[in-house]
Image (cartoon, rainbow, N blue to C red):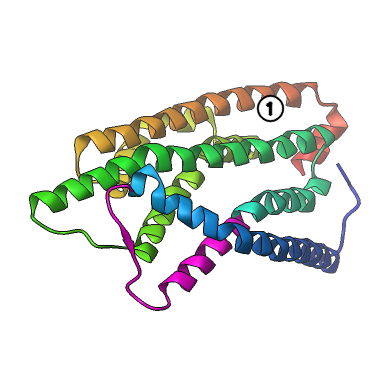
Amino acid sequence: MNTKKMPVTGHIQELRKRLITVLIFFLFALVVGFFTAKPVIRYLQHAKNAGMFTMNAFRVTDPIKVFMEVSVVIACLLTLPVILYQLWAFISPGLYEKEKKLTLSYIPVSILLFIAGVSFSYFVLCPLMVKFMMGLSNEMGIRAVIGIREYIQFLLEITLPFGFVFQMPVVVLFLTRLGIITPRLLKKVRKYAYLALIAAAGIITPPDVFSQLITFVPLVLLYEASTLISKMAYRNAKKAAKEMPMDEQTIASE
């Protein structure tokens, strides 16, 4: 841990430097997004999810808007690891050496969980939602005319939130290490958490039990995994606190 205190202006300058680094990388990532947006859009149009209908442009400006939106999303996703690392680099001087290594390991885990959440939503949940909506349209005699921009926005609204929802274990681990939550608290609020997860599954899925169940199960598994991770982190933190010399315990408590 760096015990040398930095003035407020120093923290502001450090934060400014980190933000400039993120911005520069984002601009480079945006160039990559411009070159990769077209193949990504073509893939999304011809993927299994979209095989039931033909994409249409309802406005003259729809193609360029879709191109820009996809380019920006690609740039943001490519910049996400840099944002996480810069955030870690900003707070790491106030951490002990073991805490630095531990929190640095959060970054690849967080990225993998984000990819897992997006993949689950796109490959499992989205096909079910599209199939349900198209079936409902056919039953009501409605001919579905799908706009390319509306479809891309639908995918983004479904997949990206799941990427962040799958961060639950990392967030719980971090909050446990900070002492904000405990395994006992997570167990105490389990039934309320389950109700919240049921409500979330009902909001983001079609009103059929099968789709909601497929969404609810991984959310429950994430919560239970988060509880188990919190228990392990809490136990390790208590053990480390007992082994810490008295002078370091005094500094840590200040």
**In the depicted view, which residue is nearer to us: 28 or 164?**
28
Residue ranking furthest to the right: 4
Classify residue 106 as left or right of residue 49: right
Which residue was labeled with disc 1? 237
**Residue ID at (45%, 45%):** 162
Q: Is residue 173 above or below residue 50?
A: above
Which x, y percent locates residue 121? 41, 42
Asked if residue 203 lies in the magenta stretch, the reply is no
Q: Which residues are magenta?
A: 51-76
The quadrant of the rendering that contains the N terminus is top right
Classify residue 196 as left or right of residue 10: left
Which x, y percent locates residue 93? 83, 48
Which x, y percent locates residue 30? 65, 64
Q: Secondary structure at mark 1?
A: helix
**Residue ID at (68%, 59%):** 29
The quadrant of the rendering that contains the C terminus is top right
Which x, y percent locates residue 226? 51, 30
Residue ranking furthest to the left: 140
Residue type (three-letter) at the residue carrying disc 1:
Ala
The quarter holding residue 132 reads top left
Q: Is residue 42 above or below residue 100?
A: below
Total numbered badges shown on the rendered structure = 1
The quarter holding residue 120 reads top left
Classify residue 126 as left or right of residue 25: left
Classify residue 39 as left or right of residue 94: left
